Image (tube, rainbow, N blue to C red):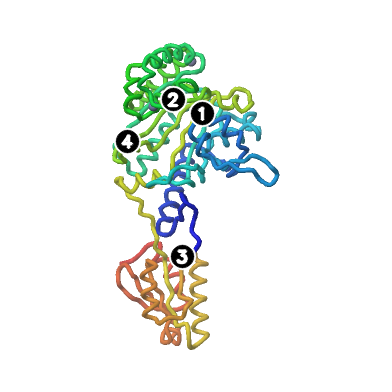
Amino acid sequence: MLRAPRGTKDILPPESHKWAYLESLLRRLSKLYNFEEIRTPIFEYTELFSRTVGESTDIVRKEMYTFQDKGGRDLTLRPEGTAPVARAFLERGLAQGALPKKLFYLGPMFRYEKPQAGRYREFVQYGVEILGSPSAYSDVEVILLAVRIAEELGLTGTVLYINTIGCPKCRQAHREDFVKHISSRAKQLCKDCLERLETNPMRILDCKNPACREAVADVPLVKDYLCDDCQEHWDTLQQLLESLGLEYTVDPTLVRGLDYYTKTVFELKWPPLGAQDAIIGGGRYDGLIEELGGKPCPGVGFAVGVERLLLAAEKGQKPLNPDVSIDCFVVFPGGGDRRLAQAGFKLVNDLRGSGLSSDFDPLGRSMKAQMKHADRLNARYVAILGEAEFEQGLVTIRSMEHGWQKQVSAGQVLDFMKEEVSGGSK
Ligand SMILES: [Zn+2]
Ligand SMILES: [Zn+2]
C-alpha cells in the first residue's frame, strides 16, 4: 500500500471542517483590518530564501526542500511567506502604487524538520505584511490583529512580549560591547553559539541551552544603545499600547538575527500550550526590500502556523465547533417504480436549487437503512417519498431535531422546507 510521505498529513472530515472554519475566520479578520490577499508561487528561486532568511539560519542550512528542475534551475519550496511577498511587491511594481500596501497570505510552507507532535514538513501559515509604512502605528496595528485572532479563538490569558532590536546604525554601537561581553564567557557557550559568535552573535540570545542563557544574563542590551529614530519609534510603540490598555512585557532576549530586521519584534504567547507556547510572532523589517534590490521601503508583519492555532483553539474557551449538518436528506425507494425514484431524485435537486444542502442514497438500500444514513450525515430534516406518499402527491417531512412529522403536498414542499430551515418551528 502506498503511504503519504513522512511529515505530511491528510486533513479528513470532520477535521477539515475545522480548517475551513479557522481559515474563514482568518479571512474575515483580514478584511476587518483591511488586509488584501496575495497568492505567491509554492516554489521560488533558492536565492530568494538564502538571501532573505539568511545563510546562517537553520532554515537555509538544513530545512529547505531545494531541487533542480529539468532546466537546471535551483528552486526551493517556500519555507516561509514574507520573502515571496516582498519579492512580488517589488517585481510587480506595488512599491509604485498606493502605500502602505497591506497584504495577507494563507497557504502551505515546507521545511525538512524532524516530524513531531503538531509539527509537519508541509504546514500551513497565515501572515500579514504592511509594506511602505515606517510608522509605529502600523506595528501596533499588526499586534492588535494578532491579539484579536487569539481572542476570537477563545485563548484567554495570552501574553504579549515586545522588544526593539534597533537598526544597523544603533546595533553597530551595541555589537562591540555585546561581543566583548560574550567573548569573556565563551567557555560556557555551546558549539552552535560559538559558531554564532563569529557569524551572527545576536542569535546567541535565542539559544535555549541553560549555560548559554546564563552567559547572556547581564549582557548589554540594544535598547540602551538606540539612535534617536529608533528610540522615538520604541517610545511611540509603548505609549500607543498603553493608551489602548494593552498589557505587554518587554523581553530583551527576543531578537532576530538578520540585518534587515529592525526596531520592533513581538511574540504572542499562550501559556496553556506548554514549552512551545508562542502562537504568533512578528516584527519590523525595514531593510528587506533593499536587500532584494529595491529602493528602501519599510515593512512590518507577523506569521502564524495554522496547525498551532488549531491545537490552541482545541484547548481554549471556544473549541472549534463548525456546523457539519445538512439541511435535508431525501428518502425514497431505489428499486420498483422508476417514476418514484426519479421524483425523489428531482426533489433532492430542487432542494439544492433552493439553496438547501441536501443528499440522498444512491445505493438503493432499505428505507430503514436510509434513515440511519440520514442520521449519520447529521441531516436536520428528512423528506420521505414512499409509495403511499407518491400516489397521494405528498411528502412526509420529519424534523430530526424536534422529532415531529408532517405531510406536505408535493407542490409546497420547497416553500415549506425553505421556511423551516431558515426559521425552524418546534
Ligand atoms: Zn537605530
Ligand atoms: Zn548555545
Q: Residue 215 location, x and y as percent?
A: 34, 20
Q: What residue appears at the point 30 percent right and 72 percent down from the top-left corner?
A: 403
Nearest to viewer (mark 4 / mark 1)? 1
Q: Is residue 236 left or right of residue 60?
A: left
Q: Which residue is mark 2?
A: 203
What amino acid is at disc 2? Answer: Arg
Q: Residues within 10 Å of mark 3 (few under 14, many from 20)?
A: some
State the separation of the CA atoms marked 3 and 2: 54 Å
As helix, strand or loop, the secondary structure at mark 4 comes to loop
Q: Earlier in the sequence, mark 3 or mark 4?
A: 4
Q: Nearer the viewer, residue 259 or 136?
A: 259
Q: Residues within 10 Å of mark 4 (few under 14, many from 20)?
A: some
Q: Earlier in the sequence, mark 1 or mark 2?
A: 1
As helix, strand or loop, the secondary structure at mark 3 comes to loop
The disc at residue 56 is 1
Q: Residue 26 location, x and y as percent?
A: 45, 44
As helix, strand or loop, the secondary structure at mark 1 comes to loop
What amino acid is at disc 4? Answer: Thr
Q: Which residue is mark 3?
A: 357
Q: Nearer the viewer, residue 212 or 121?
A: 212
Residue 324 picture quarter: bottom left
